[in-house]
C-alpha cells in the first residue's frame, strides 16, 4: 500500500501509477474533486473530504454571517485543487445569491501576492476568496491584511476574506491574520470535547499523538493515520493482501470511531462521506495550538452528492489491478 499525496496534483499522479502497478493507494491530504472525480481509480481510496464538500458546508454559514448579497473576487492556485475549489465555492455561493466579479489564477511558485491583491481594491468586490493552501495561503492572506482589506468598507459592507480550506498548522503560519477568517476542515483535535461522543476516537488519537510528538495532531496527521488503520482493517477482514480483495473490503464499507463520526467509503467512487467541520480563526486564542474555533459541524447528508454529479464527471473507476 502507498499513502501520502499532500498535493492533489501529486496524489492524482501517484494514484494513476498505483493503478498501473497494481498497488492500493490510500490517499492523504488531497482535496481536489478530481481525485475521486474524473481521475478516480479502482485502486485508489480517499478518506479526506473534497472541494465540493467544503463549499456545501461553508455556503449556509457564509450566508448567515455575511448575507446573501455579496460580490466576490477570488485568487486561485493554478492547479487541479485550486480549479475545483474555485468552481465549487463559486457554484455554492452563487446559488445563494452572491455574484462572482473575477477569478484570477496564481502560480504555485508565487510567494508575494501584492500584485494580485492590489486590483481587488478597485474591483467593486466586498469579499475576497483565497483558494490557496499551505504557504500560498499564509502569504496571500498576509498580503491582503497588509493592504488593509479587512479594515475597508465596500458597497456599504465590511470587507470579508474567506479561505475555504485551512488547518491549525496554516493558522499558526498566518498568526493573528487568521482571526475571524472562516474556512473548513476535515477534522479538528477539539472535535470530541466540543461536539460530543459522535466524534469518539478523537481524544484517544490526540492523547497518543501528543504523548509521542508533544503537540496536537493536524487534520493531515489524522486522515493519514485513519487511512493506515482502514487499510490494515481491510486486510484483516479480507484475510489477504491481494489489492483486489482489500479493495472489495473497503468499497461500500461503513465505519465509526476514527474521530469523524459515522463514515461511508462509497463504492461508486471510493470517496469517504462524513460530517464537515466549519471553523473560524479565534479572537483570543489560549495558545499556539488553539487558533481556530469550531463554528458548526455540517452533517454528511448535506455534503453528499450523486456519483454522476457534473463536477465529478469524466472518469471511470475501472477495474481493480491485482498487480504481479
Image (cartoon, rainbow, N blue to C red):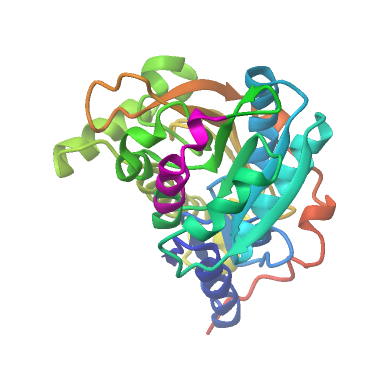
- Furthest residue in direction front, as rendered: 122
Quadrant of image for the N terminus: bottom left
Residue 87 visible in the displayed image: no
User: Which image quadrant is residue 303 in?
Assistant: top right
> How many tags in the picture?
0
Q: Is residue 144 magenta?
A: yes
Q: Does residue 125 belong to the magenta stretch? A: no
Stretch in magenta: 139-152
Give the residue displayed 58% in from the left and 35% down from the top.
Answer: 263
Residue drawn at point x = 73 percent, y = 51 percent: 102
Q: Is residue 278 above or below residue 219?
A: above
Rendered view: 74 above or below 44:
above
Q: Quadrant of residue 321?
A: bottom right
7 left or right of 127 in image? left
User: Does residue 39 appear to the left or right of 174 in the view shown?
Assistant: right
In depth, the one of 133 and 73 nearer the eye is 73
Q: Residue at x 54, y 28 (%)?
A: 278
User: Chief secondary structure of the magenta span?
Assistant: helix
Q: Pinpoint residue 201: horizontal percent, then vertical percent.
A: 38, 29
Q: Is residue 6 visible?
A: yes
Image coordinates for residue 208, horizontal then vertical, percent? 22, 36
Q: Position of residue 280 (x, y in %)?
A: 47, 27
**Is residue 176 left or right of 20 when viewed as pictured?**
left
Front residue of 264/172: it is 172
Position in image of residue 81 (x %, y %) = 60, 59
**Who is closer to the viewer here, 167 or 160?**
160
Q: Residue at x 61, y 58 (%)?
A: 82
**Height in image: 235 above or below 203?**
below
Amino acid at each position: 500500500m502507498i499513502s501520502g499525496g499532500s498535493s492533489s496534483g501529486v496524489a492524482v499522479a501517484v494514484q494513476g501509477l498505483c493503478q498501473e502497478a497494481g498497488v492500493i493507494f490510500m490517499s492523504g491530504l488531497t482535496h481536489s474533486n478530481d481525485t475521486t472525480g474524473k481521475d478516480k481509480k479502482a485502486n485508489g481510496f480517499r478518506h479526506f473530504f473534497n472541494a465540493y464538500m467544503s463549499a456545501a458546508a461553508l455556503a449556509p454559514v457564509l450566508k448567515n454571517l455575511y448575507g446573501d448579497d455579496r460580490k466576490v473576487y477570488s485568487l486561485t492556485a493554478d492547479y487541479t485543487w485550486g480549479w475545483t475549489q474555485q468552481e465549487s465555492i463559486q457554484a455554492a455561493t452563487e446559488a445563494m445569491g452572491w455574484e462572482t466579479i473575477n477569478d484570477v489564477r496564481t502560480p504555485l511558485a508565487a510567494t508575494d501576492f501584492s500584485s494580485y491583491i492590489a486590483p481587488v481594491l478597485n474591483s467593486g468586490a466586498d469579499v475576497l476568496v483565497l483558494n490557496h493552501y499551505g504557504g500560498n495561503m499564509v502569504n496571500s492572506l498576509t498580503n491582503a491584511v497588509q493592504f488593509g482589506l479587512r479594515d475597508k468598507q465596500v458597497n456599504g459592507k465590511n470587507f470579508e476574506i474567506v479561505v475555504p480550506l485551512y488547518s491549525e498548522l496554516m493558522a499558526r503560519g498566518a498568526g493573528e491574520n487568521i482571526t475571524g477568517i472562516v474556512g473548513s476542515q476535515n477534522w479538528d483535535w477539539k472535535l470530541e470535547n466540543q461536539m460530543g461522543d459522535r466524534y469518539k476516537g478523537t481524544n484517544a488519537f490526540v492523547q497518543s499523538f501528543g504523548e509521542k510528538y508533544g503537540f496536537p495532531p493536524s487534520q493531515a496527521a489524522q486522515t493519514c493515520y485513519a487511512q493506515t488503520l482502514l487499510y490494515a482493517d481491510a486486510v484483516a477482514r479480507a484475510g489477504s493482501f491481494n489489492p483486489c480483495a482489500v479493495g472489495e473490503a473497503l468499497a461500500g464499507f461503513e465505519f465509526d470511531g476514527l474521530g469523524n463520526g459515522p463514515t461511508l467509503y462509497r463504492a461508486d467512487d471510493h470517496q469517504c462521506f462524513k460530517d464537515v467541520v466549519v471553523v473560524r480563526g479565534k479572537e483570543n486564542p489560549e495558545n499556539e495550538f488553539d487558533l481556530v474555533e469550531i463554528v458548526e459541524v455540517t452533517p454528511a447528508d448535506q455534503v453528499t452528492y450523486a456519483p454522476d454529479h457534473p463536477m465529478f464527471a469524466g472518469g471511470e473507476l475501472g477495474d481493480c489491478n491485482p498487480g504481479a
